[in-house]
């Protein structure tokens, strides 16, 4: 399996592996030629590890940006914060039931006007990125608020949906469309909501 360059910044393990290999090389060189031992040689692996961890911390990959959009949406729904939700939706949003961002935000205001969910647990996700566009297919478990009118049949609901995301001029990702695929493993769509 080849390592994609963008994956180097998603996890610290590749850089820590390189630092460990560098440490092994430095130790072997120091044991082979003891007369060439210098104190700074042992700093080489430490500098590699610190540099790699610093890069991993400060560079946010597209995947991490999409993850943060998904998490912001999850928190906004739990906290009934339509304003925060509006911040992650693209101005040119469109789906099969909401032809504009304003229509979606109106739907969200009506839905989140009353207690809606207590918890949202992400169960599965698949993110596909191709250039400026990305798709995230999510399976979530909703724990509905007991006062929610949809909770008549039970407070647990499984929802599978697809988010379409676009990259803005500033490099962040916004939701440009969404589809509901299923609810409680039954085919569903925006028209049925």
Image (cartoon, helix red, strand yellow):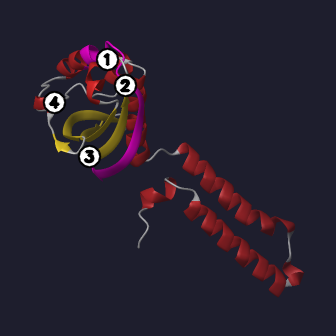
Considering the numbered disc 4 on the image, is that residue within a helix, a strand or a loop? Answer: loop
Q: Nearer the viewer, mark 3 or mark 2?
A: 2
* Residue 129 is inside the magenta segment: yes
Q: Which residues are magenta?
A: 108-132
Question: What percent of the width, then of the height, locates residue 158?
Answer: 30, 40
Cα separation, mark 3 vs mark 2, equals: 20 Å
Question: What percent of the width, then of the height, locates residue 29?
Answer: 77, 81
63 left or right of 158 in image: right
Q: Is residue 172 visible?
A: no
Instruction: Work out whether mark 1 precedes mark 2 in sequence or the reverse, and give the earlier one.
Output: 2
Cα separation, mark 4 vs mark 3, equals: 14 Å
Question: What percent of the width, then of the height, locates residue 120?
Answer: 40, 34
Residue at 79% across, 67% down: 42
Question: What percent of the width, then of the height, locates residue 128?
Answer: 29, 52
Residue 83 image-quadrant placement: top left
Q: Is residue 61 above or below residue 31?
A: above
Q: Nearer the viewer, mark 1 or mark 3?
A: 1
Q: Nearer the viewer, residue 160 or 136?
A: 160
Q: Nearer the viewer, residue 104 or 123?
A: 123
Residue 184 image-quadrant placement: top left
Residue at 78% across, 77% down: 27
Q: Marks 2 and 1: in contact by CB < 8 Å?
A: yes
Residue at 86% across, 67% down: 39
């Amino acid at each position: 399996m080849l390592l994609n360059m963008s994956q180097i910044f998603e996890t610290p393990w590749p850089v820590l592996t390189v630092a460990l290999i560098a440490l092994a090389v430095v130790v072997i060189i120091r044991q082979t030629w003891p007369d060439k031992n210098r104190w700074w040689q042992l700093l080489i692996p430490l500098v590699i590890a610190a540099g790699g961890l610093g890069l991993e911390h400060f560079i946010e990959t597209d995947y991490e940006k999409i993850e943060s959009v998904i998490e912001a949406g999850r928190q906004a729904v739990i906290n009934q914060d339509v304003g925060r939700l509006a911040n992650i939706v693209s101005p040119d949003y469109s789906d099969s039931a909401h032809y504009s961002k304003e229509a979606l935000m109106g739907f969200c205001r009506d839905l989140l006007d009353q207690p809606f969910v207590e918890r949202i647990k992400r169960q599965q996700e698949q993110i596909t990125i191709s250039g400026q566009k990305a798709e995230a297919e999510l399976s979530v478990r909703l724990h509905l608020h007991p006062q929610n009118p949809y909770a008549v049949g039970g407070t647990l609901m499984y929802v599978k949906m697809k988010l379409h995301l676009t990259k803005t001029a500033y490099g962040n990702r916004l939701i440009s469309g969404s589809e509901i695929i299923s609810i409680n493993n039954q085919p569903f769509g925006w028209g049925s909501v």
